Image (cartoon, rainbow, N blue to C red):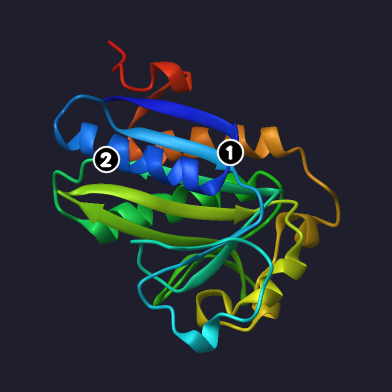
Amino acid sequence: MSGVLLDLGRMEYGEAWELQKKLVGQRARGEVPDTLILVEHDHVITLGRKTTPDNLKPQDVPVFQVERGGDATYHGPGQLVGYPIVMLNDHDIHRHVTTIETALTNAVKRYGVDGGPLQGHPGVWVQGKKLASIGVAVTNWVTYHGFALNINTDMSYFNLIRPCGLDPTTMTSMQLLTGQRLDFEGVKAHVAKEYSAASGLTLVNQKLAQSSTAPT
C-alpha cells in the first residue's frame, strides 16, 4: 500500500500542528493517502490531555495545549518529530503505537542502541531511560500527533517540565548513549525506512506544496 513521506525540515510547531489537522480532515474524506510527516521544531513545550500543573514549571518557550494523549513534553532542535496521519481501518490504536515503537527501536539499533518498549509506558526505553516519546490523537479513526526521538537534543530543556510525569533525568538521547553527535538526516532516513517496514506502507517522498495530491 502506498503512502506519502512529507519531510518538512525545520518548521515552527504551530504551523505543523495546523498542517496535521488539515491532513486529518483530508485523510478522513479519502482525499489523501496515509502520510508520515517528519519535522524538527524550534524550542516548544506541548501539553497532552493528562498534564497537571505540577508537571509544568516556569519557562520561557512557547507552550501549546494539544489533543494528544500523555503529559507534558518538549520539542526542539536535534530532535526528530514524526506525525503519522493514518486511517485506522481496524480501529486498533494499540497496534498503531506498537508500529511506531517497532520502527523507532529498529532504527536506533542501527547505531548500536539497544532499546525497546516498557510495559505501561509508550515509547522507546534504554536501560530505564526514555529515548523516544509517543503521544497520539485520533479523529474519525485518523491518527495524528505521534513521536519524538531525541537524537542530538539539548536535554537541559526537559528541566522545564516533568516529561510525561517523569523526572527530567529519566530522558536520554542517541548522542548521550553513543557518545557522539549523529548525522540527523541519516537517522531520519532510517526512521522513515523502518516505519515503512513496520507499517507496510510504501512511502513516496512528496513536497509540502504537493501534499494534498495523492500519489498514484
CA neighbours of label 1 inside 10 A, class few (<14), some (14 to 19), many (20+)? few
* Residue shown at the point (67%, 73%) measured from the top left: 59
In the rendered image, the vertical position of residue 174 relative to residue 166, given as above or below: above
For residue 137, side relative to residue 129 (left or right): left
Taking depth in this image into account, of 52 and 2 the one nearest to the observer is 52
Would residue 74 be found to the left or right of residue 112 on screen? Answer: left
On the image, the x and y values in percent for residue 49 come to: 35, 72
* Quadrant showing the C terminus: top left
**Residue extending farthest bottom:** 54
Number of marks: 2
Q: Picture quarter containing residue 215? A: top left
**Marks 1 and 2, how far apart in space?**
18 Å
Callout 2: helix, strand or loop?
helix
Check the image and report above or below for 102 versus 197: below
What mark, if any, has residue 11 been given in the picture? 1
- Between residue 123 and residue 11, name the one nearer to us: 11
Name which of mark 1 and mark 2 comes first in the sequence. Answer: 1
Query: What residue type is disc 1 on?
Result: Met
Residue 168 placed where, x, y %?
66, 78
Residue at x-position 68% and y-position 33%: 185
Nearest to the observer: residue 26 or residue 214: 26
Whether 194 is drawn above or below 125: the answer is: above
Q: Which residue sits at x=75%, y=51%? A: 152
- Give above or below for 31 relative to 179: above
Label 1 residue SS: loop
The type of residue carrying mark 2 is Val
Q: Nearer the viewer, residue 20 or 163?
A: 20
Which residue bears the numbered disc 2?
Answer: 24
Task: List x then y, in percent, for residue 106.
Answer: 54, 47
Few, some or many residues within 10 Å of mark 2 (<14, 14–19, 20+):
many
